[in-house]
Image (tube, rainbow, N blue to C red):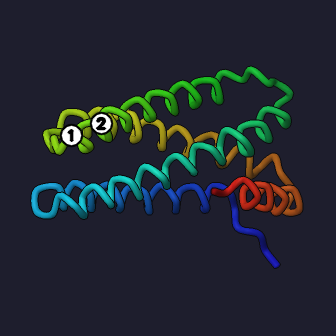
Amino acid sequence: MKIETLANFYANDHHRLDGLFAAFQDLKGKDRTNAKVTFRAFRSGIEQHMAWEEAVLFPEYEDRVNNPEDAATEELRTEHSQIQDQLDVIEEKLKNNNFETTRDETRLLKILGDHNRSEETGLYATIDGLLTSQERAEVFIKMKQAAW
């Protein structure tokens, strides 16, 4: 049995999350209740995604390159913090029924776009190349155990 690549898994999750965010953007002008629900689903999904990366994927990568303070993962962690900050800003506005979030969404999408490209063209392919099929299967098991 062939194990799915981490690059495929994470890229597919990026696309899933992009779809949720686009749905939120579409709904916020039409159905504010469902827009909030959709934003929360997006937020939950992206927070799980980042948690998997930080708890499982980044340490696997750092172990393989023998550098626990690798600049690539350090930058990605910084971007995760920036993403979290933007999620907080949008969430706070939505809690107050303020749907004037376009500027905040633009900031978030800019960070996410650059971040996802960096991961998809660098980190994911690199770690797939460093792991055997068995090790990749073990990473997926660790991710499943770390799921919310």
Q: Is residue 25 left or right of residue 13?
A: left
Residue sitting at x 37%, y 34%? 88
The picture places residue 63, in percent across and down from the top left corner, at 85, 34
Quadrant location of the C terminus?
bottom right
The picture places residue 20, in percent across and down from the top left corner, at 35, 60
Quadrant location of the N terminus?
bottom right
Mark 2: amino acid: Glu
Q: Which one is in front, 37 or 6?
A: 37
Q: Is residue 97 left or right of residue 68?
A: left
What is the C-alpha distance between the residues marked 1 and 2?
Answer: 7 Å
Residue 61 found in image quarter: top right
Q: Which one is in front, 136 or 54?
A: 54
Mark 1: amino acid: Asn
Contact, CB < 8 Å: mark 1 with mark 2? yes
Residue sitting at x 62%, y 44%? 51
Does residue 141 sit above or below 72 in this rendering? below
Residue sitting at x 42%, y 57%? 17
- Outermost residue on the left side: it is 29
Q: Secondary structure at mark 2?
A: helix
Q: Which residue is mark 1?
A: 96
Residue sitting at x 52%, y 33%? 80
Q: Which one is in front, 7 or 52?
A: 52
